């Protein structure tokens, strides 16, 4: 079963969410639907802010779908799959609206890339973080620029070179991946909605200009992320990665 996305419009707030049964992991169709949604919302003059979330009370996002990773057998298909994460980061970066993301639970791999591409992030104390790519024979190459932009090289290094180590939500807050911690998980949605409601009263052009400043120095990312997707794809079809995918899928 493919993941799905859902969009609701309430006044000037767009509520975009996604879901997949495998801990909200991302498959190609889900990534495509999110890219399309952000592009649509970017040009919608009635929308001032986007509230982005995953569904459920468990994991925020388990990264790339292991099922789809296990089905990668050729460089062309693999490149297209990993470039899906690059395209989503680019769509979030280019979206003219401020993206407020709420993170209720753990995130792995590509899920951290989604968080890093957000403009403002509220997190629950349950929002653990891990980059496990080395465990499956690849690297977090596509999401690396977004994470380094938010956290810096040192924090990114600590994540990607410790692929079995979970970092807690406080670590995410201290290292800049999260902007705000909500101490009571049951209040996360309410506080995210309150934040979104505040942004909808700000001047649209001012928010757009601020976002452009926040993303200065990233105009080369379309080429960079595509190159990193190709490198990741090459790793994904090698024996080490294929054996790891089969192990996780068994």
Image: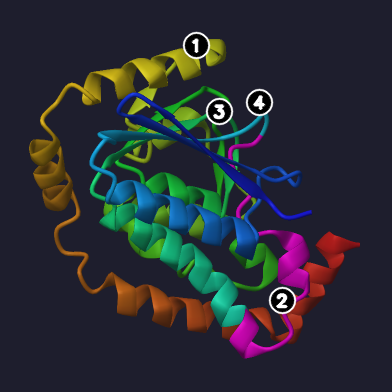
Label 3, label 2: how far apart the Cα atoms are: 30 Å
101 above or below 84?
above
175 above or below 223?
above
122 horizontally vs 248: left or right: left
Instruction: Give the mark, 2 or 4, whose residue is nearer the N terminus.
Output: 4
Q: Residue furthest right?
A: 250
Part of the protein shown in magenta: 59-77
Label 1, label 3: how far apart the Cα atoms are: 10 Å
Residue 31 vs residue 72, the one in the foreground: 31
State yes or no: discs 3 and 4 in contact (Cβ < 8 Å): yes
Residue behind mark 1: 187
Instruction: Give the mark, 4 or 1, whose residue is nearer the N terminus.
Output: 4
Residue 57: image tag: 4
Element carrying mark 1: helix
Q: Which residue appears at 62% of the width and 33% of the height?
A: 55
187 horizontally vs 156: left or right: right
26 horizontally vs 43: left or right: right
Residue 173 vs residue 122, the one in the foreground: 122
State yes or no: discs 2 and 4 in contact (Cβ < 8 Å): no
Element carrying mark 2: helix
Residue 157 rendering spot, x and y as whole percentages: 42, 58
Residue behind mark 2: 241
Label 2, label 1: how far apart the Cα atoms are: 40 Å
Q: Which residue appears at 43% of the width and 17% of the height?
A: 182
State yes or no: discs 4 and 1 in contact (Cβ < 8 Å): no
Res 217 visible: yes
Residue 89 rendering spot, x and y as whole percentages: 39, 58
Question: Is residue 223 found inside the magenta-colored segment of the image?
Answer: no
Residue behind mark 3: 104
Element carrying mark 4: loop
Quarter occupied by residue 44: top left
């Amino acid at each position: 079963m493919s993941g799905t996305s859902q969009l609701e419009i309430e006044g000037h707030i767009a509520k975009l969410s996604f879901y997949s049964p495998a801990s909200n992991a991302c498959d190609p169709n889900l990534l495509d639907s999110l890219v399309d949604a952000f592009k649509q919302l970017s040009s919608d003059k009635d929308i001032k802010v986007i509230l982005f979330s995953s569904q459920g009370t468990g994991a925020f996002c388990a990264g790339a779908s292991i099922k789809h990773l296990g089905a990668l057998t050729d460089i062309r298909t693999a490149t297209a799959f990993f470039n899906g994460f690059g395209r989503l980061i680019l769509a979030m970066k280019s979206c003219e609206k401020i993206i407020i993301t709420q993170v209720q639970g753990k995130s792995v791999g590509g899920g951290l890339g989604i968080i890093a591409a957000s403009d403002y992030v509220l997190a629950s104390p349950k929002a653990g973080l891990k980059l496990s790519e080395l465990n499956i024979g690849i690297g977090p190459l596509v999401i690396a620029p977004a994470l380094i932009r938010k956290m810096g090289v040192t924090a990114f290094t600590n994540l990607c070179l410790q692929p079995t180590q979970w970092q807690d939500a406080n670590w995410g807050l201290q290292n800049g991946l999260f902007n705000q911690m909500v101490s009571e998980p049951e209040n996360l949605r309410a506080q995210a909605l309150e934040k979104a409601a505040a942004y909808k009263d700000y001047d649209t052009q001012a928010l757009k200009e601020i976002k452009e400043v926040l993303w200065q120095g990233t105009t080369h990312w379309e080429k960079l992320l595509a190159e990193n997707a190709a490198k990741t794809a090459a790793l994904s079809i090698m024996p080490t990665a294929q054996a790891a995918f089969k192990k996780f899928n068994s």
